[in-house]
Amino acid sequence: MKLLNVLPTLDPAAGGPVEGVSQCALALAKLGHVVEAATLDAPGTAFLADAPMPVAALGPGHGKYGRAPRAPLWLREHAPRFDAVIVHGLWQYHGFATRQALRGLHVPYYVFPHGMLDPWFKSAYPLKHVKKWLYWPWGEYRVLRDARAVLFTTEEERLLARQSFWLYRTRERVVSFGAAAPPGDAARLRDCFFAAYPTLAGRRLLLFLGRLHPKKGCDLLLRAFARVATTEPLLHLVFAGTGDGDTVAQLHTLARELGIAERVTWTGLLQGDCKWGAFGASDAFVLPSHQENFGVAVVEALASGTPVLISDKINIWREVDADRVGFVASDTVEGTLINLRHWLSLDPSSAARMRTRAAAAFAARFTIDAHARTLLQALAPPPFSA
């Protein structure tokens, strides 16, 4: 098949969906499929040089919505080269442009919402939800309605999506998501991380890796960590990721106020071997998120054999709990604290067994190759009926 991914950006700092699209493109290419991308990035943007597929940069997009007049013109001209178009994410111009460009063409498009229909956003950002309602009937509702199918990464995400807007009509499919495995020898990857952060060697590291965003529960993690730090002198918290200036500044201030600033390292965005080394070097991965439709970083931790301490608002929490590869609690300070205490109470042999189960769970459920296969099944044309 020839597939076109359409998304706002391929910036790695944008989080899990970008990583998922990139890794899936590599897996599909190995199977003999042709994959390209179109984004609202400006031509010549530096990170596009590292993209694992040809990219048409149709921006720069204007404003937060990302309006790029060139996008629908390019899509209408080039979409007929592809068997299917896959739109990733909502609430920006790329989805609207795809629907407009493909009208009247015999090219189906599909939409991955990537959690952007979760009702948590409605309660967390009520004013933004009102603005979305004003846009929904003539914009995103029609993008979803006219798609060949809307692809959800978990059954939980599919059911939650129905609760955000009463005007809702889609053809739904669940397509298991996945992540890549660590590239090579675990010891080499850990050495890469410790070469960049030598003062962390010998510490018991708790890792947060992702966007520093209010929905991720970073403040919960800082508060819970402050309550266990005094009992474990070698315990150290690593925040790997970027966020907007105000959010990052607030988190730094909170760490100082809690008296744990010396026990927290802020690495910024980690990529490649250094990222995988951070997973492998860590005692556990922690994500007390308020909303997560899948959690690519959670799965990357499992791939590295690193147990996960997560909230029950991450839509793969049931799999984590069933496979006994971590601990699950509420997205509160108390819930995060319970997870930390459960992990710290484990004896070394129990922790080692959990690490073994983590790697096995990844291999059984969450490989990128499995995701590529299920995606191809979802994109297969419907059977002909006489």
Image (cartoon, helix red, strand yellow):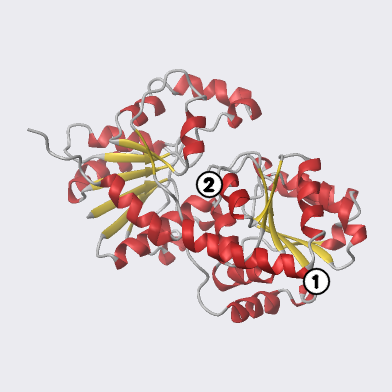
Mark 1 secondary-structure assignment: loop
**Of callouts 1 and 2, the N-terminal one:** 1
Residue 45 seen by the camera: yes
Q: Toward the viewer: 122 or 46?
A: 122
Quarter of the image where one finds residue 261: bottom right
Relative image position of residue 230 (x, y in whole percent): 92, 58
The percent coordinates of residue 81 (x first, y second) are 18, 51
Q: Position of residue 89 (x, y in %)?
A: 44, 41
The secondary structure type at the circle numbered 2 is loop
Q: Which residue does the numbered mark 2 point to in the structure image?
A: 294
Callout 1, which amino acid? Arg
Foreground residue, 51 or 62?
A: 51
**Dividing the picture into quarters, in which one does residue 188 lie?**
bottom right
Q: Are marks 1 and 2 in contact (CB under 8 Å)?
A: no
**64 to 138, vertically: above or below:** below
From the viewer's side, name the closer residue of 105 and 162.
Answer: 162
Q: Residue 135 location, x and y as percent?
A: 45, 23
Distance between the Cα atoms at labels 1 and 2?
A: 29 Å
User: Is residue 187 found left or right of 296 in the rendered image?
Assistant: right
Residue at 36%, 63% (x, y): give it. Answer: 27
Task: Classify 10 Å Cα crowding around label 1: few (below 14), some (14-19), many (20 and above).
Answer: some
What amino acid type should be assigned to the residue bearing mark 2? Phe
Q: Which residue is mark 1?
A: 203
Would residue 282 be seen by someone viewing this image from the given angle? no
Check the picture and name the quadrant holding the C terminus: top left
